[in-house]
Amino acid sequence: MAQVREEIIAHPEELAACCAELAKCPYFGFDTEFVGEDTYHPNLCLVQVATPNCLYLIDPLTAGPLDEFWQLVVDPARIVIVHAGREEVRLCRLWTGRTPGNLFDLQLAAGLAGWTYPLGYGTLVNQVLGVQMAKGETLTEWRHRPLTSAQIRYAFDDVRYLLPVWRRLSARLEKQGRTEWACEEFTRLALNAAPEEPTTERWRKLRGLGSLDRRRLAIVRALYNWREETAARTNRPTRTIVRDDLIIEIARRNPTRERDLHVVRGLPRRDLDAILQTVTEARRLPLEQCPVVWGREQDPPQVALVTNVLMAVLGDVCARRGLAPNLVASTNDVKLLVRARLANQPLPPESLLTAGWRCAHILPDLLAVLEGRRQLRIADITADAPLDYADTTLTRPV
């Protein structure tokens, strides 16, 4: 692999020159180092950038605002290469209000091109390029200056292989006819990593909701949203405001005065007034505006059985086509199909299998088995794809 120039960007004038060079590039790769444990918004400590001719380490602590860099990232005329880029998308959204305009994620591309998903960066580089990367700085303290020589070497290496891997994966996807599949996945990554309304229904993921009625669910929702807004405004981690389990406990107690909160162990005292006000406002909601209680799905036993069969079919189909099954669909995606079939209802749009390339290239195989139009047997237990299929419409008696 040809040697490329390495530059550390530590001053505003150097950043301006770097961005001027990046503006000429039709593509570049980048990665970030940040610390997020102590704040709500991540503390960006380093940006690593790879172009065909140069590797840059941009120090945001000394080089000044990175507005010009982020504008290059959101420009759809330029391909931006990342690996497992959820956090890079979030950072981009935080500073620009927009997501990358033309994203290429190596981890997703690898899962579509025949590799396991998700693969770590070092493993992917090794499997695609045959290069063994050194480890050792993954938990380093990136806020301290000056950076050590080991940190600098690690940071350069973190982007050194982005473009070579991208070229290999791009060529392979093109050969397989899956470039559009990949673009669909990159768009989904950008949308999921930076949703328009990040607090919408996320409170439903809290544990312990099952025992709460509608009014107490309204309190949970209100407290969760208040916590997110407070954390964002004060740049504090959500756990330092009120923990998840304490939100459930407060809703269960349904306090009417501040003294009722004093007995809740582990609840910080500084926000008690705001918490009580939030609870009071939620309690005043008309019942029809309170969240509906979600009952647990009571599936008949055949749903689990048929889902397991279809998951086996999914694994077999993916093995034949060189796809990572866990990138294609989850067990819940398949279960949604089975439930719809059992209830004689349309295919559920919330299943990934009912849209895009999955719908066109994977769903028909699953439906053929689910609807009894195709039967299967174990043909070769030693094969990666051990199943064999027969069209039942050709074997049925007239």
Image: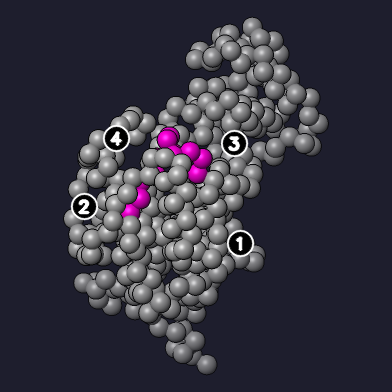
Left or right: 376 in relation to 270: left
Residue 284 location, quadrant: top right
Sequence-wise, the earlier of marks 4 and 2 is: 2
Between marks 1 and 3, how big is the CA–CA gap? 23 Å
Instruction: Pick whichever, 312 or 242, lies toward us.
Output: 242
Left or right: 58 in relation to 332: left
The residue located at (54%, 46%) in the rendering is 67
Three-letter amino acid code of the residue under disc 3: Trp
Please tell me whether residue 59 belongs to the stretch shown in magenta. Answer: yes
Please tell me whether residue 289 belongs to the stretch shown in magenta. Answer: no
Query: Mark 3 touching mark 4, by CB under 8 A?
Result: no
Instruction: Pick whichever, 29 or 187, lies toward us.
Output: 29
The residue located at (73%, 34%) in the rendering is 290
Left or right: 287 in relation to 328: right
**The label number, if any, that marks residue 48 in the structure image:** none
**The label number, if any, that marks residue 348 in the structure image:** 1
- The magenta segment is 55-66
Sequence-wise, the earlier of marks 3 and 4 is: 4
SS for callout 2: loop
Residue bearing the label numbered 3: 203
Residue 200 shows in this picture: yes
Q: Report x, y in % for residue 122.
A: 26, 53
Sequence-wise, the earlier of marks 4 and 1 is: 4
Sequence-wise, the earlier of marks 1 and 2 is: 2
Sequence-wise, the earlier of marks 3 and 2 is: 2
Between marks 3 and 4, how big is the CA–CA gap? 39 Å
**The label number, if any, that marks residue 147 in the structure image:** 4
Say which of marks 1 and 2 sits in front: 2
Residue 308 location, quadrant: bottom left
